[in-house]
Each structure stands twice: as structure tokens, then as C-alpha cells.
Image (spheres, helix red, strand yellow):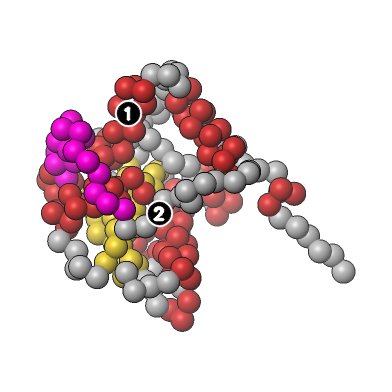
Amino acid sequence: MDVYEAVTSRRAVRGFTDQPVPREVLERVLSAAAWAPSGSNLQPWRAYVLTGRPLAELKKRAGKRVAACDPWDEREYEMYPPTLKSPYHERRAAFGAERYSALGIVREDWEARQRAAAENWNCFGAPAALFCYIDRDMGRPQWSDVGMYLQTIMLLLRAEGLHSCTQMAWSVYRKTVAEILSPPDDLILFCGMSIGFENVTVPYTRTGRALLDETVTFLDG
């Protein structure tokens, strides 16, 4: 798979089979992803990978919180600005409409929407999950570095025939994640990432992208 195919075939998959992901594949991907760029080579990421019993236990504990309607953990960062201006508001709204429509869920069916959202904390059935942390002393440029690291991982997973889904949703159950991982106190959980083989029976709509001239300006000599 060349890099163009990896980029264009990558998407947030929200349905996985239980086929195990070999440890050697995960090690190969993460070893190569370490070459992702970072300012002054800080490499400001810290990743934890869960499979097997540890992941099953995390899913179990998160599931109990969901079932009990346990309040979310306080956020350590804002996922989105309080007010999204145009065109970002419209893009987010379109994404939500397309996602739930593909699942046959109407906007008014709040319970069905909640059940679909709760699948985040089951990793959409994935047999492997990565949790990415960053030192809380780091600034915005280093958060950007973490994004490049995660993108590199996702593209390498595609080269291995795997899919993924990054999930900032795990940040609101960060204390439950910490019960399993015991990360140092100076780290912030940025996101989780579900990893596995796609369950092709799960319906989805591929979210489109803005036209080039909406996001790119060429200045020619």
C-alpha cells in the first residue's frame, strides 16, 4: 500500500472484529512511528497499548460507569471551542447527521444516540487500544507533535491492513483508564485509539472533505 492509498483509505472505523492484532505488528508500527516529527526532537508523547485481559477489564469498568450514568471526569482540556463559528459548526453538524443516519438513528432518538456514543468505551469491539498521553507542562506546539505521531501510527496501521479510530471521548473517563495504566501524575490523557480489523457489516458513511480552494491558497510568482 503506497502512502497515498494509506492516507485516502484511513478513516475512523467504529466497528471491529475480535480477530487479535499480533504483538509484533503493533511493535513494528510503533517503532516506525517514533520517527514522526517533533520540534527539537522532544518526542512529547507517551503511549500505552492494551490487549487481552487488561483491555477487557478497562472495557468492563467503563461499561459499568456508562450503565450507572456515572458523571464524566472533569476535562483537563477542551475538546472544542465553546462556540464553533462557520464553517466549523456546519462541518461538525454534517458529520453527526451522516454518522447517525448511517446507523438508522433519527435526530430525535436520544437514547439510540447515547447507545451509539457509549460504544466509544467498548472501543467499538476492537481487540487492541492505544492511549496517548502528553506531559502537562507541554505547550501547543508539542500537542501538534502528538497529533503528527498519532497520524503516523494510523497510516502505518493501514499499511498493515488494520484500521483505527482516535477517541478523545476517553478523556472523560480518564480516571478509569488511570486505574488500569497507573500513569505518572504529570501526564494528561489526550486520547484513546481503537485498533483492529474492520467489521465490514457495520454501516457507515464516508465523511467528505472540503474542496481544495476552501482550505488552501496558492500564491504563484
Give the quarter of the image for residue 68: top left
Residue 152 horizontal/vertical position (percent)? 45, 59
Q: Amino acid at mark 2?
A: Glu
Label ID, residue 210: none
* Residue at the (78%, 60%) spot, across then down: 218
- Label 1 sits on residue: 114
Dots 2 and 1: beta carbons under 8 Å? Answer: no
Measured in 3D between alpha carbons, the distance from the residue under mark 2 to the one under mark 1, in whole angstroms, is: 21 Å
Q: What residue is at 49 percent from the left and 45 percent from the top?
A: 10
Q: Is residue 172 left or right of residue 56?
A: right
Write down the quadrant of residue 143 in the picture: bottom left
The magenta segment is: 58-75
- Residue furthest to the front in view is 83
Nearest the viewer among 49 and 169 is 169
* Residue at 43% across, 19% down: 108
What is the residue that sits farthest to the right in this orientation?
221
Under mark 1, the amino acid is Gln
Q: Label 1: few (<14), some or many (≥20) within 10 Å?
A: few
Residue 206 is left or right of residue 65, and the answer is right
Q: Which circle, 2 or 1, is nearer the viewer?
A: 2
**Residue 183 occupies which quadrant of the picture?**
bottom left
Q: Residue at x 56, y 33 (%)?
A: 94
Return the residue at label 2.
Answer: 78
**Residue 161: image location, x then y, percent:** 41, 44
* Left or right, 177 with reference to 114: left
